Every structure is written in structure tokens, then in C-alpha cells.
Amino acid sequence: MAIVNHAKREINAKIVYYGHEGAGKGTSLRYVFERIKPTLRGDLKIQPTAGSTLLFFDFSPFEQPVFGGYRIRFHIYTLHGNVTNPAAWKMTLKGTDGLVFVADASPGALPATQQSLLQVRDFLNAYGVGLHDIPMIVQLNKADQVGQISPLEFASTVGLADCSTILTTATTGEGLLEVLSQLSRDIMLRIRESGDVPLEEVVVVENSPVADNCDMEDNSDSDLDAPVSEELFVECLPEEEPANAGQAVTDGLQFNVGEAGVSIEGGMVRIPLDITQAGGVQRLVLTVAIGPG
């Protein structure tokens, strides 16, 4: 489970990219590192460990606190190349809050993928953690080399039919930001549900903190059509927001109630907010728990 420091009001969560040699772990991690805004991430570090090479960096997906004044930071790890010492993977996986299982989509790589899956199960079980006890995304890499492939069919073949599977091409970056976006949100939802931060203060972020529909670096049709917003990771142009009846302005901050409107479910009230400051837009959902008077 993520480490919550109440004194510093910080949440630290760990994500590991796991897979066999040549699956694309290191290439994936380097790509997402380059695409995350430099102001939101630390340095990419390379460290020899147990006969292998450890790649890691940390980043915060939001410039401001999102959990009632708590800041969240993700720490991303992988082992690059041929891992000859299994202890290196076991050490890297300790305390994992989310897993990206990188699989090679090439038909000839299926045995290696299945072996890799057995190994990661064993490593996690050693810590008393089941493969389905933590958020997990199957990253089906090298999809461009094998033509059309069904992610659901592949996941079912390796026994992961109940996991989200996303097609990627690490050499071009296709799908990589979608993988990290979805896993980050899944981890944040798990943190909210854990009760480790005060429920009445939790702000749940549904979308990227940067304006939607802005110009992105190295855009392609696949980037624009991706179901998950990628503006979290790249520099964007600010977007002007029209005034509306649900608008409020305070000390340079402009608040608008989102188009979805306020919703009430049982004792939970959800208020979508668009917050504009210095031309940038953050889209948040304020969740309030209402108890008996």
C-alpha cells in the first residue's frame, strides 16, 4: 500500500514495469520519462544492482495537492536487459502499489511471457501479495510487428482476462502514456478507498490537470484518438474558458462548475470543478460525504 506521511501530507506510491528481456520495459520507461513535463518529475537514474541495471525516476501528476492537501508522487522502477539474479526483481518489486506487466506481442515470445508471469506471481507471493491484490495493466508491446491482435484474446491466453490490456509500440510511444495514465488513476482510487486519507477532504481528479484539446508535442492521429487524456505528460497551450453562471473568481483563480453538473449518490455529493489560473485549467471532482445531522 502507498506510504502516507500525515506529518508532511505526502503520499508516495510505487509502480514497477515488469517483463522478460526484450519485452520493452526500459524503452517504455525512458519514453514516458521524456514526455512527462520536466517541472513535474525528478531525474532518470541508472543504478547497477545485483548484476542488473535498475532504471527509476519519480514524478507528480499534479502541480498542487489533490487529496485534501496531500501531495501524491509516483516512483517508477524497472530492471533493464537480462536479469540474471532473480533477487534483483524480488527486491525491486518490494512494496509495489501498481504493476505494468510488459508482454511481447510476437507469437514466438509467448513462452517467455508465460514464464515471466509465473515469476512475478512468485515474487509477489513472497511478500504475501497476490497478482490481483494490486492495480495492474497488461502492456501488450510490439503490436506493430504482428498486425491486428486482440488484447482480450491475448490476456485470456495468459490467464489475465480480468486485467486491462493496452496495445503499445514502445519504439514510437504509441499507447505508453495511456498505460501510465490508467494505472495512476487506478492507484489513486485504491488510495481513496483505503481510508488512509480523510474521506471528507479527498479531491478526486478525473482528468488531466492541464487544459484539454491543446497542441501536444509530436502529435499523431493515434495520440489524438486515445481514450485517456495525455496532456498530463506534455507541455500544452492554455485554453480560454467561457464565462458561465456557475463561475466564481477569487484572487486570480476562476472556478466553474463542470458541464456534468452536481450529482448526489446516497450520502455522497460530487461537484465537478474547472479551475482556471494563469490560463491553465485543472478539472477536479470534489467528493463530499454527508452524514446524519
Image (cartoon, rainbow, N blue to C red):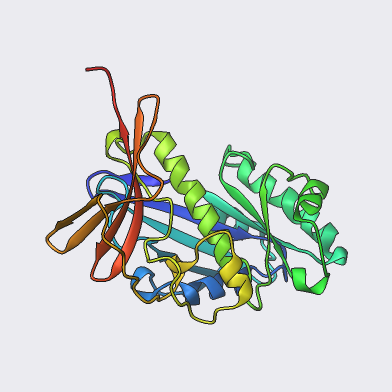
Quadrant of the drawing holding the C terminus: top left
Residue 48 appearing in the image: no
- Looking at the image, residue 130 sits to the left or right of residue 98; the answer is right
- Looking at the image, residue 10 sits to the left or right of residue 170; the answer is left
**Percent position (x, y) of residue 178?**
57, 62
**Percent position (x, y) of residue 202?**
32, 41
- Residue at coordinates 21% horizontally, 59% vertically from top-left? 254
As drawn, which residue projects farthest toward the top? 292
As drawn, which residue projects farthest toward the front? 245
- Residue at coordinates 51% horizontally, 59% vertically from top-left? 181
As drawn, which residue projects farthest toward the left? 251
234 up-or-down from 242: above or below: below
Instruction: Choose top left, top right, bottom left or bottom right for residue 89.
Output: bottom right
- Residue at coordinates 27% horizontally, 39% vertically from top-left? 201
Residue nearest the viewer, comparing 270 with 144: 270
- Looking at the image, residue 233 sits to the left or right of residue 271; the answer is right
- Residue at coordinates 38% horizontally, 71% vertically from top-left? 42
- Looking at the image, residue 255 sits to the left or right of residue 150; the answer is left
**Percent position (x, y) of residue 66?**
32, 51
As drawn, which residue projects farthest toward the right? 108
User: Across the whole image, how many numbered discs are drawn on residues?
Assistant: 0
206 up-or-down from 146: above or below: above
Residue 207 appearing in the image: yes
Instruction: Choose top left, top right, bottom left or bottom right for residue 116.
Output: bottom right
**Percent position (x, y) of residue 96?**
52, 50
